[in-house]
Amino acid sequence: MRHSRLNLVLLAVLFISCAGSGTTAQKMQQKISQFDRAGFSDFLIDKNGVYHAVFQESPAIGKPTFIYYSVSTNKGASWSKPVALSNDGTGNGAGGPRILEDAGGKIYAIWKRYGKTGGYPVGDDIMDGPGGYRVGTLFYKVLSGGAWSNQVQLNEREARQGSWFAAAAPSGGVYVFWSQLYPQATIADWPHCDYLRMAGLNGTSFAYRDLNKPPTPPTQQYAYFNPTDGAINLEGYIDRGGNVHMVYEDNVNDIQEVKYFDGHAQKIVYTYPKYKQGNTFNNPGRLLVDGKGNDHLIFLPCEATLESEQLWDINLAANQTNVLTSIEKPNVKIKGFQANQGPNGAMAITIEAGAVGESNEAFGMYYDHGTWKDVGLTRNASKAKFFSKDFIGVGGYLTNVSLLTAYSSTFATVAYDAGGRKSMLMTISARTVGNSGYSLDNPFLVYSPVDH
């Protein structure tokens, strides 16, 4: 038996320095993307109430997938024309982005670029998702004083980084965590990304820190070397004490292990057979925290081990599993889910589900002060009888996909303002259109207030 050596116990009491780097809802729904080829997105409402959106989009078939940025200074009523952040002239595309703010009001847009400078361009990679599957290079830009900085490379070498997440500490700093290939690796696969690192960002400068010691390969040049256990679906946050909480998956003897680090020690919280759950990197587990400081792992358990497809909430402090919802109708699948942290322990979950070969409906689950509220987000979601519980329709929750005759929701992200009010970005593929002029089957990004 091969024992795990990617051990976060080596991080014991990992501590982050407290020094900071330093109308009606229907009328307010807005289309943000330009080319109807949008993908993953992230959403930030900053301390001044300004709305920031970053998202993937390709200008045309055969063109790279770039990261675009748009801003709204009037609470989502109108948005600026998107500008490309990741088009660095290499012809390489980028994976799903993140956007965060530090204590000084600087905005950081972060993404993983595919390919290498001067190499054969990699415009897109359908095998890469929010959990990270393909290796690439992390880059970021800083918005300060109304202008974006030059692109900053967040690693010594290109095409070494796999799974990653970014977090803003309560102290005000912005930090990035990632898994990367061990230094001598020549095979660019995620199982070889068993070297965990982090960086604290301070504008366009940053400082690295290694979180574990990577293995040493054999001295013989052609000897077979089995990597320890590369990390995928890396996810986490920083608590008020500066401790990093994180979850990730690795593979040990053909068993996928979901591991959780609580800031002090690591443990395995879930296992399932390898190759039995499909591409988990498209819907990685999300680590959230409630108002009592208890960590919650929101994830899709292995459907091959269950009678119905389900979405779970594991209270990691109490070691209790809550089935948030389960599919009750044949041939219906949970196509995706996302989860976002809100203030004071609030949580927002969005789910895309539908029958095989049909359009997806979007559903929302919102947690506040110990109670979950289930809401239909798209036109027919409140009527759909897919799940073990009802999702009610609430005024202001319907997105403008209600204007379309057919549609498919593929991704959503929720942001909270200072008052705890929610707004949402959703990627939607329009299949049939009326007079709206949207292209057939092309995904576009829309903004919609949730409870304004």
Image: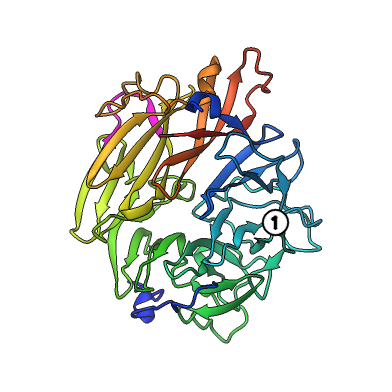
Image coordinates of residue 452 in percent, x first then y, are 43, 34
Total count of labels:
1
* Colour approach in the figure: rainbow
x 33%, y 38%: residue: 365
Q: Is residue 451 left or right of residue 435?
A: left
Kindly state the secondary structure of the residue where label 1 is placed.
loop
Is 123 situated above or below 256?
above
Return the residue nearer the eye: 129 or 168. Answer: 168
Q: Is residue 209 left or right of residue 240?
A: right
Image coordinates of residue 343 in percent, x first then y, are 37, 53
Image coordinates of residue 184 in percent, x first then y, are 60, 78
Residue span colored magenta: 324-334
Q: Is residue 233 left or right of residue 31?
A: left
Observer able to see residue 272: no
Residue 330 on the magenta segment? yes
Residue 150 on the magenta segment? no
Q: Give the amino acid at mark 1.
A: Gly
x 62%, y 25%: residue: 441
Image coordinates of residue 142 in percent, x first then y, are 66, 62
Is 158 situated above or below 69?
below
Q: Mark 1 — residue? A: 146
Return the residue nearer the eye: 384 or 309. Answer: 384
Q: Quadrant of the N terminus?
A: bottom left
Q: Label 1 neighbourhood size at 10 Å, few (<14), some (14-19), many (20+)? A: few
x 48%, y 68%: residue: 172
